Amino acid sequence: MWVSSGKLVQGKNAILVVDDEPGVLRVATAAVGTAGYRVIVAGDGTAAWEEWLTHREEICLVLSDVVMPEMDGLALAEKILEADPAAKILMMSGYSDAALEVRARKTLPFIRKPFLTGDLLRKIGSMTDGARPAR
C-alpha cells in the first residue's frame, strides 16, 4: 500500500528495474529499495515483459534502460503501453543516440546515466506524484 494525495491505494508499491548491466541494476535497485519500494529486477526486455505480466497490478513504475539485447527498452515500453496506456515508464541510457531517440518520441520521461541517486528518486517521485509506499 502507498498513499497518494490523501487516498490509500492498494497494491501498487513495486518498481520494475530493467537493465542488462549488473552495476546499474545494483545502484538503481539500492536507490529504489531505500525509498521504500519493493523492487522487481529484470536483466533484459524479454524478462521484464514476463515480470510485468506477472506483477502488473503491483508495479507503479517501470525504470528501463533503452539499449539492451533481445528486446530493447523502447520495444518493452511500447508493449507495456499497448497493454496499459496509463503505465508509468522512466527510460534511462548513457548513450547519446538512445537519449535522442527517447526524446524525439516526446512521450517517455528520460534520465541520463550515470545518474545521482537523489536525481533518480526525485524523477521517480515526480512520476508517482511524490507517493511513497507505506512502510
Image (cartoon, rainbow, N blue to C red):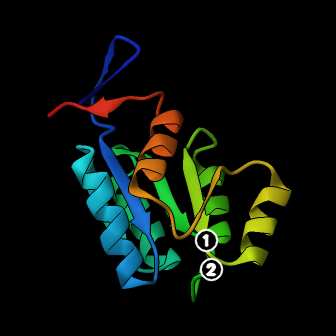
Residue in view at x 47 percent, y 80 percent: 44
Quarter of the image with the C terminus is top left
Q: Residue tagged by mark 2?
A: 67
Kindly give the residue lying farthest to the left in the view shown: 135
Please state the horizontal and vertical placement of residue 62, each as a whole percent of the image.
Answer: 48, 55
Displayed quadrant of residue 17: bottom left
Q: Residues within 10 Å of mark 1 (few under 14, many from 20)?
A: many
Quadrant in which residue 110 is drawn: bottom right
Front-most of residues 12 and 82 = 12
> Does 27 sit above or below residue 80?
below
Residue at image point 33% right, 38% down: 12
Real-space Cα distance between discs 2 and 1?
7 Å
Question: Where is residue 36 drawn, in percent x and y?
Answer: 23, 43
CA neighbours of label 2 inside 10 A, class few (<14), some (14 to 19), many (20+): many
Q: Is residue 97 left or right of residue 71?
A: right
Residue type beneath disc 2? Val
Q: Quadrant of residue 28?
A: bottom left
Residue 53 visible, this angle: no
In the image as oriented, which residue stretches furthest toward the right? 104
Camera-near label (2 vs 1) is 1
Question: Image point 80% across, 67% down: which residue?
Answer: 101
**SS of the residue under disc 1:** strand
Callout 1 amino acid: Ser
Q: Which residue is mark 1?
A: 93
Q: Secondary structure at mark 2?
A: loop
Looking at the picture, how far across and down is residue 56, in whole percent?
A: 40, 50
Number of residue marks: 2
Q: In which quadrant will I find the N terminus?
A: top left
Query: In the shown orientation, is residue 53 left or right of residue 100?
Result: left
Q: Are marks 2 and 1 in contact (CB under 8 Å)?
A: yes
